[in-house]
Image (tube, rainbow, N blue to C red):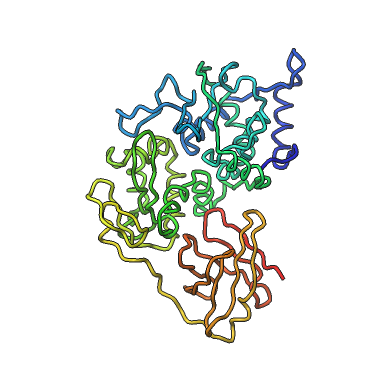
Amino acid sequence: MIESTRRTGLLIIALAILAAAGCDSEDGQPANTVAGDDASIDRSRYLVEGLLQCFICHSERDWETPGGPPVEARAGAGRVRSDDGQYRLVAPNLTPDAETGTGNWTDDQLARAIREGMGHNGRVLSPRMWYRSFRHLPDDDLQAVIAYLRSIDPVYNPLPTTVLPPDYQAELNNRGPVELKPVNLTSADLVEVGRGLVALADCEGCHTAWDAPENGPLLAGGNPIERDGRRAFSTNITPDASGMPYDAATFIEVIRTGKQSGLHPLMPWIAFRNLSDRDLRAIHAYLQTMPPVAHFINNHAEPGYCAVCGQMHGLGEMNSAWQPAGIVLDADTYDSYVGTYYSEEYDFRFEITVADGRLMARIDDDDQVVMTFVSQTRVVVPGEATALDFVFVDGRVARLLTVESSPVVLERIE
């Protein structure tokens, strides 16, 4: 992700900053304050303390209060998230303190840290800073976030720096630039707005069993979450009876109250409760479009083995290995699917071949597996969390799209 200085997606912001801030500061250094009006400050508070959950990570938490809200006097002042002597992860001080915070960072440095994962000192940030999600932030909202971070009271809070294992840091450095993909949060299509909100909030990051022995389906829960000595499994939020089958009004009530404070505090409902009814309805509308997956999870029940995610968690014994119902394709259509597909952004290769009269998939150098076609244009691959959609051009598959709020595109290569 180390790259030459670029302004893709930031030119509009840069011009707005120059217009608002005038020119260089008195000491000849670039001016670093976005001038924000009341509307932009209100919008930014909504983003920082709500959708983007900035203070959930960048603050000490009051775990004695339901939901574990940020300690009010230290909101945004940063904290050491983990430190085992070799791997130290620090959420830095976001307040405008000149010595220990962001007071001497330029707006461009803040913008690139938020959306591109480039630290103010040139270090590529750990993905625990959700820049892969925040790259979807619209330009005007990014400017509003920066304005709000400039407006809060500075807090003096000296912190050590993040230290990643050298090989991991080198891997981050070599991944290439983050492609900016701002979403439209003003669309009249509620599902599309919900898709953008889910991408920004990274719901899929927590509510998919990426770190489980078996990759459960997208948004079906089972990801083990650990923070500050607390551990919980994320819940199933697909529209299955074991997940989130209820209507929008109930969803809003759950988020507003934390299920009457019954939700585990590692679920940041304390931030999401700040979202508007319209945005919560949009999120609910999008989640209801997900394929329902039977995956019972309860963090208060005695753990049992779960065949869906391969872990021990509450109600795990109620679950059977998930297998969607498939269809049989006409063998005469096989040639339209066969080929190699590649994502340059993620260096991810997907190969479809025919073996023993069946269409087979191979991901990178893994073993071949039989795909389950749930329709002519959608396939589920064993061991993969996301389904794949086929995009046909002139009767032949031209590309694949992962079924996510922010799809990965794999182009057909010859």
In the image, residue 150 above or below residue 48: above
- Seen at 31% across and 65% down, the residue is 320
In the image, residue 310 above or below residue 89: below
255 relative position to 119: left or right: left
Quadrant in the picture for the N terminus: top right
- Seen at 65% across and 76% down, the residue is 396
In the image, residue 158 above or below residue 199: above
Residue 65, x across and y down, in percent: 31, 29
Exactly how many numbered labels are in the figure? 0
Q: Residue 339 versus residue 72: which sits nearer the camera?
A: 339
Residue 223, x across and y down, in percent: 40, 50
Residue reaching furthest to the left: 302
Q: Residue 85 versus residue 207: which sits nearer the camera?
A: 85
Q: Residue 155 versus residue 128: which sits nearer the camera?
A: 128
223 relative position to 66: left or right: right
- Seen at 68% across and 47% down, the residue is 176
In the image, residue 291 above or below residue 257: below
